[in-house]
Amino acid sequence: MALARVDDENISDKVANEVREAIQNGEFSPGERLVERTLASRLEVSHIPVREALVRLAEEGLVERTPRRGARVAALTEQELLEISSLRIVLEQFVCQRVQKVWSTSIESKLHKVVDSMITAAERGDVDRMFAFDRKFHEELWEIADHKLLLSIASQLRGRINGFLRAANGALAPEELVAHAMSHNDLISALASGDATRASEEMTTHIEIAANRIDMAQTAGDVETPLPLDS
């Protein structure tokens, strides 16, 4: 596990950031136990900031905590996936509306550069790098939308399923991985068209495909199911 040593300043914040990133990058699997003592040792901190960080991550839905049984990486039920995806659609459609209001050739060029890098990574079979550019693409849209609360909520919802998305994308065949990366150009075209309905429909399709991919991966066992905490 590639957790980095945490410095003294804002210790619990940094611990939360490290563990959150590890969960979202798939370093911790759904259902995997998060032992305070082990995390504290790896991050070279005391157990107190680790406990505080786990409480925060539980509030974000990334961690499940059970009294006297510890913490584990949260699993994702079919109902939770449906709820998260349906809410993401509403928020991302709003993102599209705001992005279209400030659309410019420079924005279009910036997004295409991200997608080009995503496609290159996909063609090389580099799932980690492709997924990083996938995240960057959506983060760029949130930034362009220029709405702090929207950015925070959209980021948290996406973060809740990032680990599952990464695992599902990793299970794609090489040509499917490239097709996924290229599909982001369809989003750019829809945004550039100025047609709000087209942009909303394209974003809806994009999110629904992602949700279906996660669901299929979990059904097929490509995304691990949670283990009992006392196993």
Image (cartoon, grey):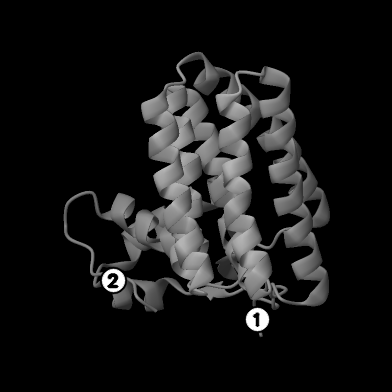
Residue that extends furthest to the left in the rendered view of this protein: 8
Q: Residue at x 31, y 77 (%)?
A: 42
Relative to residue 161, is residue 75 depicted above or below? Answer: below
Q: Can residue 141 be seen in this view?
A: yes
Give the total number of marks visible in the rendering.
2
Closer to us: 126 or 190: 190
Q: Do the residues labelled 1 and 2 touch (CB within 8 Å)?
A: no
From the image, state whether disc 1 or disc 2 is nearer to you.
2
Which of the numbered marks, if any, corresponds to residue 230? 1
Residue that extends furthest to the bottom in the rendered view of this protein: 231
* Quadrant in the picture for the N terminus: bottom left
Relative to residue 89, is residue 6 depicted above or below? Answer: below
Residue tagged 2: 43
- Mark 1 or mark 2: name the one nearer the start of the chain: 2
| Type of the residue with mark 1 | Asp
Closer to us: 114 or 64: 114
